[in-house]
Image (spheres, rainbow, N blue to C red):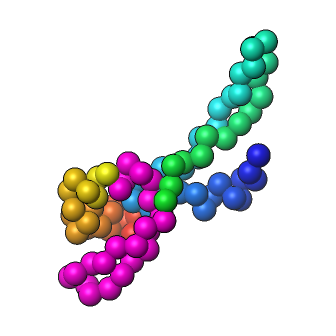
């Protein structure tokens, strides 16, 4: 089981999604704590307006949002919310 300090770095930079805590439930209904990690990937994007590459740690749902709305729109909204610098 990962330590708490290891879970802090596993956060989506656009949505803020992170690991959740739940229970493993055995056939005998014994419950033990477990961690549900966020589904994160590391992805590089090129921003035409700024003429530079950025690397983001994203959840797969954030990647789908980028594909749907476009990178420029999503990055502007994340900066407005204070998630990106």
Magenta residues, as a range? 42-63
Q: Nearer the viewer, residue 85 or 35?
A: 35
Q: Residue at x 69, y 58 (%)?
A: 6
Q: Position of residue 71 (x, y in %)?
A: 26, 66
Q: Position of residue 84 (x, y in %)?
A: 39, 69
Left or right, 19 with reference to 42: right
Q: Position of residue 50 (x, y in %)?
A: 26, 85
**43 shown above or below 67:** below
Left or right, 80 with reference to 29: left
Q: Quadrant of residue 77?
A: bottom left
Q: Quadrant of residue 49?
A: bottom left
**51 shown above or below 62:** below
Q: Nearer the viewer, residue 27 or 20?
A: 27
Q: Is residue 50 visible?
A: yes
Q: Is residue 85 visible?
A: no
Q: Residue at x 22, y 53 (%)?
A: 68
Residue 43 within the segment the image draws in magenta: yes
Task: Specify the quadrant that holds the C terminus.
Answer: bottom left
Left or right, 65 with reference to 6: left
């Amino acid at each position: 089981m990962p330590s708490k300090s290891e879970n802090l770095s596993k956060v989506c930079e656009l949505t803020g999604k992170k690991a959740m805590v739940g229970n493993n439930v055995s056939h005998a209904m014994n419950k033990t704590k477990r961690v549900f990690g966020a589904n994160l990937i590391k992805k590089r994007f090129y921003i035409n307006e700024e003429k530079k590459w950025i690397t983001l740690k994203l959840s797969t749902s954030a990647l789908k949002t980028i594909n749907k709305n476009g990178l420029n729109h999503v990055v502007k909204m994340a900066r407005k919310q204070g998630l990106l610098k």
